[in-house]
Amino acid sequence: MQVIILGSGSPLPDPVRAGPSTLVRTGAGDLLFDCGRGVLMRAAAAASGAGAFRALFLTHLHSDHITDLNDIFTVRWIMSFEPRPLAVFGPPGTASLLQATEAMLEADIGYRLAHHDDLSWRPSSRVTEVESGVIFDEGGVRVTAAPTDHAPVRPTVGFRIDEGEESVVIAGDTVPCAGLDQLCDGAGILVHTVIRRDLIESFGLARLTDVIDYHSSVPDAAQTAARNDVSTLVLTHLVPAPAPGTEQEWLDQASAHFSGDVILASDLLTLDVTR
Ligand SMILES: [Zn+2]
């Protein structure tokens, strides 16, 4: 397996960091986890794309994690030569999100159906709402979901992908919790969204301070990795975006709690999964 960070950013627009999204390349195809701002531009750089995704998995329905769902929905449709429903796995609420996305695009769907004689079907999706357990099992690749804790956002899920002896966990946004621990047990790579609590507190802005209580700080993520014998921790969804020259601070905050490999994600970071 291979992990490609498509977007390492956060809700705040950034010139070099797309919104949260991670591609896991498996023997069962390209599995996409979340679809933040710019996901298809980054997927193109990784030689993937809307038509290549075997399935889309959503950790939760916060806007920054689903910003470009409509782009995937539309591009997959207009670049296919036969109906190819988009398989989507996500927490309860995902089915109505897809219905609303289709409704939002109704005018565009009408324009294109009227204009292209060889396009006679509507875009479509096949949604499976998930909270826990094995949710995907195909070609030797298994995806397991477990509930995470991003309250007051509910429900939210994390995912673990297993192929042979290799494993990857996509934590999504969460504070440390039992569901995430269960997914992380002995995992090869943990992709974890993080915030810098120390920096956010120093800004003193209420709107920003509010995010502290439902995200993991860098030490929180490192402790989750250490507690569960993870091999490599990848820090992503970086809030605030690291100022140039401060990258080592992030790594040091993690290494104080975790002796495995720690990597600070940038867009298109590509890692081979080795265990
Ligand atoms: Zn969130």
Image (tube, rainbow, N blue to C red):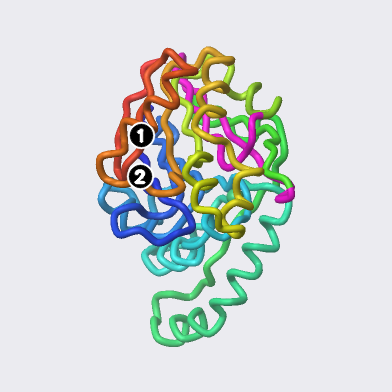
Residue 216 image position (x, y, % from top left): 57, 36
Is residue 89 found left or right of 178 in the rendered image?
Answer: left
Question: Between tags 2 and 1, which lies in front?
Answer: 2
Q: Quadrant of the N terminus?
A: top left
Which residue is disc 1 drawn over?
264
Q: What kind of residue is marked 2?
A: Pro
Q: Amino acid at mark 1?
A: Leu
Q: Which residues are magenta?
A: 152-176
Q: In screen coordinates, is 201 left or right of 245?
A: right
* Figure check: 260 above or below 125: above
For residue 255, above or below residue 20:
above
| Residue 47 pos. (x, y %) | 27, 47
Determine if the C-beta at disc 2 is less than 8 A from ligand 1.
Answer: no
Q: Measure the C-alpha gap from mark 2 to mark 1.
A: 10 Å
Residue displayed at 25% across by 40% down: 245
Residue that appears at 44% across and 16% down: 231
Q: Which mark is residue 242?
A: 2
- Image-quadrant location for residue 205: bottom right
Q: Check the image and report above or below for 197 versus 42.
A: above
User: In this view of the protein, which residue sits in the foreground, 252 or 205?
Assistant: 205
Quadrant of the rendered structure where residue 227 is?
top right
Q: Are marks 2 and 1 in contact (CB under 8 Å)?
A: yes
Position above or below: 86 against 32: below
**Which one is earlier in the sequence, the residue at label 2 or at label 1?**
2
At 40% across and 86% down in the image, what residue appears?
Answer: 115
